[in-house]
């Protein structure tokens, strides 16, 4: 079967963000900022750089700030205009996608990542699409999702981003059972969610970038909740393996797990050190802090 090119991306942002409480009590985790923009904007920027045209947010309760962030802010923009603050005006306005290109879908209950993706089925329709978990921030010149899309265009199948992790961490991720491996693309023979590290089929962990065929929605429709009542994306993806080619891609770029405090701080440091305005001063500060600690 031939599919149209990947034009749509789904951003599941309806999770509770419990690991970041109290910061996430009244504010979505995806609005936490790395350097000068929220995590969700880093993800949307990556998608746009890879040619994605439509951005589908799967929102939960209290996530209005995400929709507002990608809307025009008339009063703010008008004030900036009147004050002649053109650079700031550009920063506020230029990141807003074209009218009609942002779609918001509600996940009424946080029933898991698989359920969140399923909630986007009508907005996606019958075409392959990208999924972004905005917690995972990937720093690099070649957008991670663009690398996955290129592999999908070659194979016609599903592609997930994978990363080698220490075996003792395998239990934190979905892990692939690896088949043929050319050093970058790895055939996926099976998928296991959060395996016991000792019996994990590999140490190749799935991180938050996917290109999926629309048939995933039928697998999600079958609804096989876990003991905790969640519908897993990994489980539905595992049932796609016999249907179409399925690969993991060792992408180029540095991934930060911004769903954890350490990963979030590392991301801020890495982005800060590369920033032309603050990088040099931040490096001196960080160096002094390290010296004072010793
Ligand atoms: P996480 O496992 O990181 O969960 O979800 P979380 O609720 O966001 O954060 P913690 O673990 O409580 O700190 C992975 C991704 O799936 C989305 C989240 O928003 C996040 O982007 N998600 C998860 C949903 O959209 N709906 C769900 O029901 C669960």
Image (cartoon, rainbow, N blue to C red):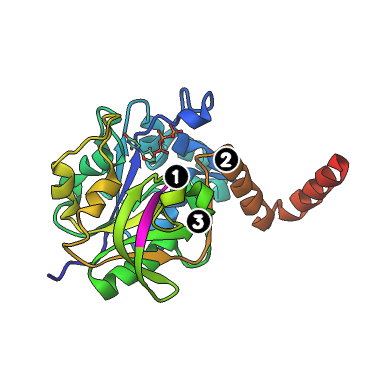
Say whether mark 1 is within 8 Å of ligand 1: no
| Quarter containing the C terminus | top right
Mark seen at residue 138 = 3
Q: Is residue 104 visible?
A: no
Residues 186 and 195: in front is: 195
**Mark 2 — residue?**
83
Which of the two marks, 1 or 2, is nearer to us in this view?
A: 1
What span is colored magenta in the figure? 171-177
Q: Is mark 2 within 8 Å of ligand 1?
A: no
The residue beneath circle 1 is 171
Quarter holding residue 181: bottom left
Dot 2: element: loop
Image quadrant of residue 263?
top right
Left or right of 117? Residue 95 is: right
Left or right position of 115 against 255: left
Mark sitting earlier along the chain (1/3): 3
Q: Closer to the N terminus: mark 3 or mark 2?
A: 2
Give how far apart the Cα atoms at labels 1 and 3 are: 21 Å
Could you say whether the residue bearing mark 3 is in a helix, strand or loop? strand
Distance in Å between CA atoms under marks 3 and 2: 36 Å
Q: Ligand 1 closer than 8 Å to the CB at disc 3?
A: no
Q: Is residue 107 above or below residue 126?
A: above
Which of label 1 and label 3 is nearer to you? 1
Residue 203 locus on image (x, y percent): 46, 57
């Amino acid at each position: 079967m031939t599919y149209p090119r990947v034009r749509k991306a789904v951003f599941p942002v309806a999770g509770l963000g419990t690991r970041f409480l109290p910061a996430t009590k009244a504010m979505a985790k995806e609005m936490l900022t790395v350097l000068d923009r929220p995590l969700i904007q880093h993800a949307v920027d990556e998608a746009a750089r890879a040619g994605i045209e439509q951005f589908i947010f799967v929102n939960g309760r209290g996530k209005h700030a995400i929709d507002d962030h990608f809307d025009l802010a008339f009063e703010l923009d008008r004030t900036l205009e009147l004050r002649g603050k053109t650079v700031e005006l550009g920063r506020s306005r230029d990141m807003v996608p074209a009218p009609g290109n942002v779609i918001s879908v509600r996940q009424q209950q946080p029933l898991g990542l698989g359920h969140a993706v399923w909630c986007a089925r009508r907005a996606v329709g019958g075409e392959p699409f990208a999924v972004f978990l905005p917690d995972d921030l990937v720093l690099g010149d070649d957008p991670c999702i663009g690398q996955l899309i290129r592999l999908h265009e070659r194979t016609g199948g599903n592609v997930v981003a994978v990363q080698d992790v220490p075996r003792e961490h395998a239990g934190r991720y979905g892990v692939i059972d690896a088949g043929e491996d050319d050093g970058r693309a790895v055939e996926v023979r099976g998928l296991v969610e959060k395996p016991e590290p000792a019996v994990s089929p590999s140490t190749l962990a799935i991180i938050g970038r996917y290109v999926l065929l629309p048939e995933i929605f039928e697998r999600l429709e079958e609804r096989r909740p876990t003991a905790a009542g969640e519908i897993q994306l990994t489980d539905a993806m595992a049932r796609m393996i016999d249907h179409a080619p399925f690969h993991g891609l060792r992408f180029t770029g540095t991934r930060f797990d911004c769903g954890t405090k350490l990963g979030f701080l590392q991301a801020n440091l890495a982005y800060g050190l590369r920033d032309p305005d603050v990088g040099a001063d931040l490096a001196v500060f960080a160096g002094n802090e390290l010296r004072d600690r010793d």
